[in-house]
Amino acid sequence: MRVARISHPGGCSHATVEPDGYALIEDPFETDSVLGASRVHHTGVVVPLSAARLLAPVAPMAVVGMAHNTGPADRALSPQAFLKPVTTVTGPGGPIPLPTDIGLVEAEAELAIVIGRTSSQLTLDQVADHIFGVTIANDVTARNLQHSDPLWFAAKSGDGWTPLGPWIETGLSLAAIGELAEHLTVDGVDLPASSTANLARSVAECLVYVTSVMTLHPGDVLLTGAPGRTGAIRPGSGVSATIDGIGTLDNTVIAREQADTGAEAVA
Amino acid sequence: MRVARISHPGGCSHATVEPDGYALIEDPFETDSVLGASRVHHTGVVVPLSAARLLAPVAPMAVVGMAHNTGPADRALSPQAFLKPVTTVTGPGGPIPLPTDIGLVEAEAELAIVIGRTSSQLTLDQVADHIFGVTIANDVTARNLQHSDPLWFAAKSGDGWTPLGPWIETGLSLAAIGELAEHLTVDGVDLPASSTANLARSVAECLVYVTSVMTLHPGDVLLTGAPGRTGAIRPGSGVSATIDGIGTLDNTVIAREQADTGAEAVA
């Protein structure tokens, strides 16, 4: 089942993605007792595909990324993670604003885990029961800044730097999540594909680590790391992150000055 | 004016702190146009002091801390910051749970800035108009973990590791905020006092830096750094952070196992 969040004439709603439209559902992250598709309750309203715009499929309180999880050699390191502000989250089609003179900025196509139940100090065998589903993330990173910014705050925290979407796929097992092909395309050029099988630590190991440090809540998001090639982006770039079995997340890079002008025009 | 957030028989509300009780106000962080005391609208209800419990005075979407801002030598470094999850926020009296075998954990008494208006790419002369007020933070940090955790995720992100309170003082100018005496007391022992005058970068400089990276919103919190002595804490410790002109923030350290048992007992 594909769970999206949409903007439509009636407001902003969660919905399942059906061939003929978006079937609205109650907020699946409001409650904390049951998981996955079993918590999807349709309201009976269907919004035509043409009358809605996809938003980021969740509005998390925490966005946690795994650091150094991009290949077998990283297993020699202690597990490490970082936080991104929730203001980095944007939806499919949302712009990725870049300041001028920021140097190299890269897109990273990553599997993102959406938490379904309050998760604290999970053991490996508890993980599957705490995942609502998976989506695609673009973990935009200012590579040059990482040198003068060892905590990665400036390198990871720009507004709109975590596109998420296009929807949450709820039907994949942990085993299936562990071997999903990942593709990144920048300005129409396909970079070499990779797979979640190449992550240094599995999704279950990542969630055991992160929840040993902090409690995650329904709707929180874990970015699992980018084992594939990252792609340089600049204002004007179009970037697409694809994970087989989920879908494709498309975004456009703009100059931050454009975003500021846009905000003023709307206000 | 002192703005608190309280739990009382009628629910959870913002309020001003008066000699005879808490005078309830509308949520001062809902709107984004006016600042400080001018945005405080009393509802007419007063809750007796004895009928209420102080909560963290804000529920931020972002908690940003300044790194390496503890003395003049730090000015030689690039400005750096880190994020703490919102699950670290707890109120006056809230427990600070520590896992066993985590090594040295320290309390840090810090001035915390509470944002009043959407703040993006601020200039130095815009800062004063974007601050709602100031409160006290205890930036609990697992010192030993910082060695194996260069991004400080595990060292800063434990549940309850950012006590905030006891209330927000709205009446201080930027100049006054720049010379507030800070004190930390652990288990009744007063550590040598310091002052916000000893911060490597001023509050205004910190906000210019952070908002050059990301947008802050009303209710978001900036931890300015701890120029004073930090204090080792362990389960059973009582810790008090005092800033002259604001108040005192008291918390108790517990073993995480106690917190887990408590949560189960409530559920």
Image (cartoon, coloured by chain):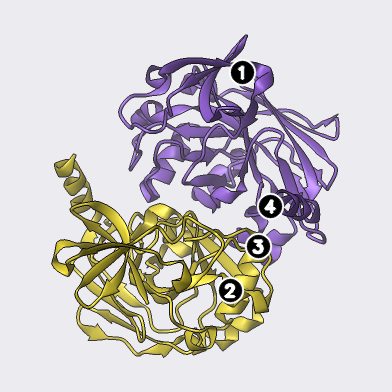
Chain colours: A yellow, B purple
Q: Outermost residue toward the top?
A: B19
Q: In this picture, is B183 found above or below A245?
A: above
Residue B191 position in % (x across, y down) = 80, 32
Q: Earlier in the sequence, mark 2 or mark 3?
A: 3
Regarding residue A225, the answer to whether it shows in the image is yes
Q: Which residue is mark 3?
A: A120
Q: What chain letter is assigned to the residue under label 1? A: B
Q: Which residue is mark 4?
A: B267
- Disc 2 from disc 3: Cα separation: 12 Å
Mark identifier at residue A129: 2
Measure the alpha-carbon separation of dots 4 and 2. Answer: 19 Å
Q: Is residue B259 left or right of residue A129?
A: right
Which label number is shown at residue A204? none
- Of tags 2 and 3, the one toward the viewer is 2
Task: Give a yes or no on whether discs 1 and 3 share a subunit.
Answer: no
Image x and y of residue B41, in percent: 40, 18
3D distance between C-alphas at marks 1 and 3? 38 Å
Residue placed most toward the observer, B251 or B241: B251
- Answer yes or no: do the residues labelled 1 and 3 have beta carbons within 8 Å? no
Distance from label 2 to label 1 (Cα)?
A: 49 Å
Say whether marks 2 and 1 touch (CB < 8 Å): no
Q: Which residue is mark 1?
A: B245
Q: Amino acid at mark 3?
A: Ser
